[in-house]
Amino acid sequence: MRTTGSILKLCCGIVLILLLGVFAGGGGCAPQQVVTTYLLDSRAAVRPLPVTSAPNQVLLIAEPQAAAGFDTPRIAYTKTPFALEYYTQSNWVDTPARMLVPLLVDALERSKGFDVVLPLPTSVNGDLRLETTIIRLQQEFQPQAPSRVRLAVRAKLIDIPTDHVLGTQLFEIVEPAPTEDTYGGVQAANKAVQRLLGELQEFALRYAPEKNKFGQGLPAAAAIAVNVIGIPAVVPGSIKSAVAVTRPAVPAPKPALAQPQPKPKRVATAPPKQGR
């Protein structure tokens, strides 16, 4: 009995030691980090721009490219020049480039300047292609100053049939952060994207050439023309008004001048001889 009781006490002591070790070890482990994900979403804030005449074209939106260090879901920030760091407990839901695609499509649709706006890839033949590159998207911490978010994007509008670059522009937007943390940077980034979308609307409408559905180079008013028995209808304003041409009057012939009459010749006559 004593031997059995001693063995039980020994086993209980070993189990107790093991449990204490487990609890002690668990207390020494670092707690699991919770990662918060954030969105770039400013679609509700973008308003349509007034457009006097629609170019009647199909605009295709290419997926933005990203410079080195920014093609990642990690949220970037800087404290010193040339040093790029990332938050460890905060990420974007996706890369900024992929999150920007639906925002670009929505903003250009709201501009009412294009018949169709579609993201690439697509089987639809387009007239124009908008290409963008994210150069910077970072929260910048400054000594003795509020942090700010810098967004730099280069845009290029291309005529697809000719592969001709119609326009290119660098957009650089700086937005102050309301708080000195990740969420403050996310708020500033969304405001910067909102401003970028508005400027891209103006950029695309400024460089997009007008193209009529019934032919290149016709005035916008001719878009309402219809074909009647194979003969295109005449649209007011599509044909220049005729210019009256007046011919100068033919001058009347001048009267013929009278021919001068020849003067009669004088014949010298000898004086009569005197008689002696």
Image: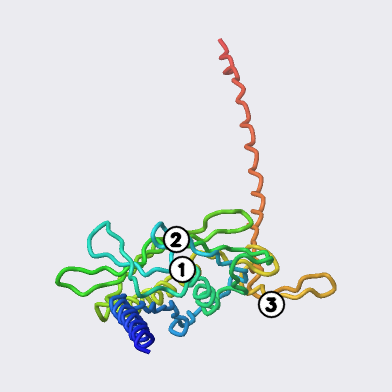
Q: Is residue 47 above or below residue 59?
A: below
Q: Earlier in the sequence, mark 2 or mark 1?
A: 2
Residue found 81% across the figure and 75% down from its top: 228
Q: Is residue 253 left or right of residue 79?
A: right
Closest to the observer, 91 or 246 = 91
For residue 224, the mark is: 3
Residue indicated by mark 2 = 66
Identify residue type, mark 3. Answer: Ile
Instruction: Identify the residue under disc 1.
Output: 95
Q: Residue furthest top?
A: 276
Residue 89 on image: x %, y %: 35, 75
Which residue type does callout 2 highlight?
Answer: Ala
Mark 2 vs mark 1, CA separation in Å: 9 Å
Q: Nearer the viewer, residue 194 or 14?
A: 14
User: Disc 2 vs disc 1: Cβ atoms closer than 8 Å?
Assistant: yes
Q: Secondary structure at mark 2?
A: strand
Crowding at mark 1 (Cα within 10 Å: few <14, some 14-19, many 20+) = some
* Snapshot quadrant of residue 223: bottom right
Image coordinates for residue 53, horizontal then vertical, percent: 56, 75
Relative side of 13 to 124, left or right:
left
SS label for mark 1: loop
Q: Quadrant of the N terminus?
A: bottom left
Quarter residue 181 falls in:
bottom left
State whether residue 102 is above or below residue 244. below
> Tags 1 and 3 in contact by the CB under 8 Å rule?
no
Residue in front for this viewpoint, 224 or 198: 198
Of the image marks 2 and 3, the number of the one nearer the N terminus: 2
Point out residue 265 in the picture as x, y percentages from the top left corner. Answer: 62, 26
Q: Nearer the viewer, mark 1 or mark 3?
A: 1
